[in-house]
Image: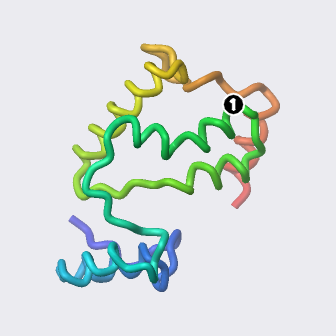
Amino acid sequence: MALLTHSHRFSAQSGIGELARWVNQGDAARSLAVLQSAQWPEVSLQATLDDEQLLQRRQPYWQAVTASANLADLQQAFAAFMLLAAERRQVDDINRRMEAQCEAAGLKEPGRVWYLKPPGDDQRKRLRAGAVQR
């Protein structure tokens, strides 16, 4: 087991950074306070989201994908709604529920890995270039 003490993705002064600090220290009251505070609007406590709400919150991303948006816009749309789960099994459950919702909405063919449609050759080249450039 390892304790991650530094995030290269989120600032220590962000809502995620503040939440991580109190979770790592085992302070449930302060963790909850961060989730309920207007000071950090990028994090919030959602006791439950039903399947329809999950799909609706992800809708701007799907719209960007179907519109063949550029990579920066795709990333921004994707990052606008992120879930943080306490256990891996919760993530797997949410992913299965989202996949079923996408199939029901016609965003994904059952049994296929690709959602909507595979990126075209041009988009594949951009994805590869973005993955190599750091």
Q: Is residue 16 above or below residue 133?
A: below
Q: Secondary structure at mark 1?
A: helix
Q: Residue at x 45, y 78 (%)?
A: 40
- Residue 77 in the image, given as x and y percentages of width and height: 62, 50
- Residue 116 in the image, given as x and y percentages of width and height: 60, 23
- Residue 45 in the image, given as x and y percentages of width and height: 32, 64
Residue bearing mark 1? 66
- The kind of residue tagged 1 is Thr
Q: Residue at x 48, y 85 (%)?
A: 13
Q: Residue at x 73, y 53 (%)?
A: 72
What coloring was used for the rendering?
A: rainbow
Left or right, residue 22 beside residue 122: left
Quarter holding the C terminus is: bottom right
Q: Is residue 61 above or below residue 112?
A: below
- Which quadrant of the figure has residue 101? top left
Circle 1: is it few (<14), some (14-19), or many (20+) Cα within 10 Å? Answer: few
Q: Residue at x 71, y 41 (%)?
A: 128
Q: Nearer the viewer, residue 48 or 133?
A: 48
Left or right, residue 88 beside residue 106: left
- Residue 52 in the image, given as x and y percentages of width and height: 39, 35
- Which quadrant of the figure has residue 97? top left
Residue lying furthest right in this view? 122
Q: Is residue 45 above or below residue 92?
A: below
Count the labels in the image.
1
Quarter holding the N terminus is: bottom left
